[in-house]
Amino acid sequence: MRVYLVRHGKAAREGYATDEARPLTKRGRGDAERIAAQVARAQIEIQQIRHSGVLRAQQTADIFAQAIRPTGGVVRVPGLLWDDPVEAWVQALPAESAPVMLVGHNPFMEELASLLLTGSPDGAPVHFTTSGTACLEYMGGRWALRWMLNPEIVPGKE
């Protein structure tokens, strides 16, 4: 079983009524598009993309969906916000029958990756930049990091 963890793209900082209403910037959209295109070129199949419901995460999820066409679509789910506990995902992810992508926020993404890989949410073995994308695989009762992409290593304009 594989899970793909994605931190939303770079978001606008000012001029919005709430934090949840902040959209992706031009750079954030471009970074997410480049990484999504790289994932699509690798012909990675994902059953469903799940996002936190916050605008910048939804926009990032939609960009990935346009590139990789998940069979189960894009859905909003609870439990992917910056301050949500990660423990429930550790129990739920191994039971998934097909690869899923989770699009959320830091520190949640780093804590989830850390808990999956090290057994502690405080280990921080993976750093998620905006649009950072990691593939983790569950094999033999353990999680392993398969690969990680950040905008600075994916070819194209920023």
Image (spheres, rainbow, N blue to C red):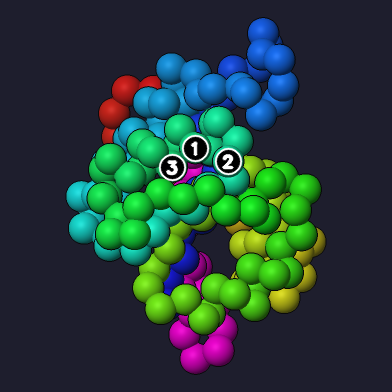
Q: Relative to 107, is 153 on the left or the right?
A: left
Amino acid type, label 1: Gln
Q: Are marks 1 and 3 in contact (CB under 8 Å)?
A: yes
Residue at image coords 49%, 37%: 58
The numbered disc on residue 61 is 3
Residue at image coords 71%, 58%: 111
**Which secondary structure, mark 2?**
loop
Q: Relative to 70, is 86 on the left or the right?
A: right
Which residue does the numbered mark 1 point to in the structure image? Answer: 58
Residue at image coords 58%, 41%: 53
Q: Give the residue furthest to the bottom.
A: 140
Residue 55 can be seen in this image: yes
x and y percent of residue 151 in the render? Answer: 43, 36
Which residue does the numbered mark 2 point to in the structure image? Answer: 53
**Which secondary structure, mark 1?**
helix
Magenta span covers which residues? 128-147
